[in-house]
Amino acid sequence: MAWLILFAAGVLEVVWAVALKQSKGLSEPKSLIIAVVAMILSLGLLAMALRTLPLSVGYAVWTGIGVLGASLVGILCLGESLNGTKLLALLLLASGILLMKISH
């Protein structure tokens, strides 16, 4: 159950990052509210998951999901560039997340 909670926390990490981008420097109230609510929920779920999971694993997976997810949303939805170096970095991030999961 902790892994499912951690995954949800990671998804909310992506939501707040994207909403923050959409807030145009904190000038769009709707996006800013979404970002703040998603941040609070994400941290709350992370705290719940860390009741069971080790900090080293839980925090690394949470931030990894956030980085990987936000990067993919940027590339797939926001028109950000993708090159070989960035693709390799994303693959390494995904590998790191998987290895942290396996290590527990």
Image (cartoon, rainbow, N blue to C red):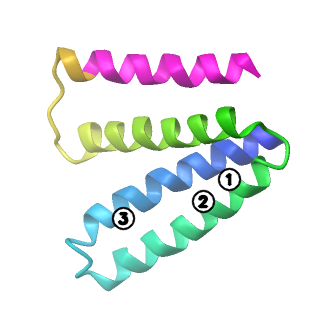
The kind of secondary structure element at disc 1 is: helix
Q: Quadrant of residue 90?
A: top left
Residue sitting at x 57%, y 35%: 60
Image vertical order of residue 99 relative to residue 30, above or below: above
Q: Which residues are magenta?
A: 87-104
Return the residue at label 2. Answer: 42
Q: Which mark is residue 19?
A: 3
Return the residue at label 1. Answer: 46
Image vertical order of residue 74 relative to residue 90, above or below: below
The disc labelled 3 sits on which kind of residue? Ala
Q: Which mark is residue 100?
A: none
Q: Quadrant of residue 99?
A: top right
Of 77 and 37, nearer the camera is 37
Residue 52, percent across and down?
A: 85, 42
Image vertical order of residue 7 relative to residue 31, above or below: above
The disc labelled 2 sits on which kind of residue? Ser
The disc labelled 1 sits on which kind of residue? Leu
The kind of secondary structure element at disc 2 is: helix
Pointers 2 and 1 in contact (CB under 8 A)? yes
Side of 64 where 71 appears, left or right: left
Where the C terminus falls, by quadrant?
top right
The kind of secondary structure element at disc 3 is: helix
Q: Characterize the local packing of mark 2: few (<14), some (14-19) or many (20 or more) Cα atoms within 10 angstroms.
A: many
Residue sitting at x 80%, y 42%: 2
